[in-house]
Amino acid sequence: MIDKFGEEIVPCQYREVRFTDAPDEYFLLKDDDGLWGFFDFKGFEIALDRYEEVIDEYAVGGGIMVKSGGLWGYLGQEGDFLEEIVPCIYKTPEEAKEAAVDYYNDLD
């Protein structure tokens, strides 16, 4: 992937690129193992783990739904990084979304 100046920000070693509906400025890249990583537009990976599936239709509070080890959780923006604000312990994305809503309601 290159930036608007034609400079390479991420090497061409990924199988797929995907942009999200989440308002923060990041995109996803799928590696050779079929796992998704999150990157900012400077080319830095901004989530510590990689994930089997990603769903941004369930976005709550600007975050994104992720699946790891067959279970669902929720990533939210924490400073410059995305962190699991809801751990990947739920069987369905709907359950993880409810936990994310509870998390954000507790912040208010």
Image (cartoon, rainbow, N blue to C red):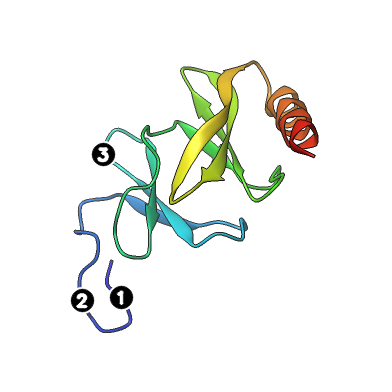
Numbered badge on residue 7: 2
Left or right of 76, for residue 33: left
Give the quarter of the image for residue 52: top left
Residue in the foreground of this view, choosing between 20 and 83: 83
Badge 2, how many Cα within 10 Å: few under 14, some, many 20+?
A: few
**Cα distance between the residues tagged 3 and 2:** 23 Å
For marks 3 and 2, give the one nearer the viewer: 2
Give the quarter of the image for residue 73: top right
Badge 3, how many Cα within 10 Å: few under 14, some, many 20+?
A: few
Q: Give amino acid for label 1.
A: Asp
Residue in the foreground of this view, choosing between 39 and 35: 39
Q: Give amino acid for label 2.
A: Glu
Q: Position of residue 16 (x, y in %)?
A: 36, 52
Left or right of 78, for residue 12: left
Q: Disc 3 or 2, which lies upstream in sequence?
A: 2
- Residue highlighted by disc 3: 32
Furthest residue in direction front, as rendered: 108
